[in-house]
Image (cartoon, rainbow, N blue to C red):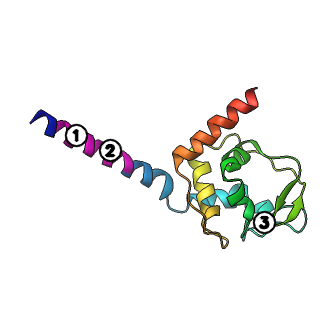
Amino acid sequence: MLIKTKFLLYSAGAAALLTLTQCFYTDKQNEGEQLYTQYCANCHMDDGSGLRNLIPPLAGADYLENHRDDLACIIRHGQTGNIVVNGKNYNQGMPGFEHLNAGQITNILNYVQTNFGNNNPRFSIQEVEKQLFKCRHLLEQ
């Protein structure tokens, strides 16, 4: 009897945690789009097309797949130096948004990953937190 009760409690707890995590971070209606509009669209454009030869596109960008493990850190801390997107060089710096939390970064990434002709796998909050932890420790060295 005790084993059945523990199993039921663990199962219910796991189901509740999974539901809360999915609802709060991945299904937050339109937050990714709103944050993209507020922080990213000014440079990357509303349609993710980028700005001529200065700002790389996010629409159909191979960079999103090839550098998946860096994307959360790029949003949080920015980026400088040359990058190659769809075979084209870009060397315009990108500011970071240190004040955005992991949930907001997750929502921006998921919006970009699934819009502008992109059909890339979504991020979990755990994946973003892991990336942010890793890059924070690299910056401290």
Q: Main secondary structure of the magenta part?
A: helix
Please rate how many residues cluster around mark 2, counting C-alpha atoms within 10 Å: few if below 14, some from 14 to 19, many from 20. few
Of labels 2 and 1, earlier in sequence is: 1
The residue shown at (60%, 66%) is 114
Q: CA distance from mark 1 to mark 3?
A: 48 Å
How far apart marks 2 and 3 lie (CA) works out to: 39 Å
Q: Give the residue drawn at x 43%, y 54%.
A: 23
- Which one is nearer the viewer's eye here, 23 or 39? 23
Tell me where residue 40 appears, x and y as whole percent.
73, 58
- Residue type for callout 3: Pro
Residue found 67% across the figure and 71% down from its top: 116
Count the labels in the image.
3
- Horizontal arrangement in the rendering, residue 84 relative to residue 32 (left or right): right
83 vs 101: above or below: below
Give the residue at mark 1: 9
Write down the region rendered in magenta. 5-18
**Residue placed under numbered mark 3 in the picture:** 57
Q: Amino acid at mark 2?
A: Ala
Q: Give the labeled residue for mark 2.
A: 14
The image quarter in which residue 118 lies: bottom right
Image quadrant occupied by the N terminus:
top left
Badge 1 amino acid: Leu
Residue 7 position within the rendered picture, expressed as x and y whole percent measured from the top left: 21, 40
- Using residue 135 as the reference point, say whether residue 21 is left or right of it: left
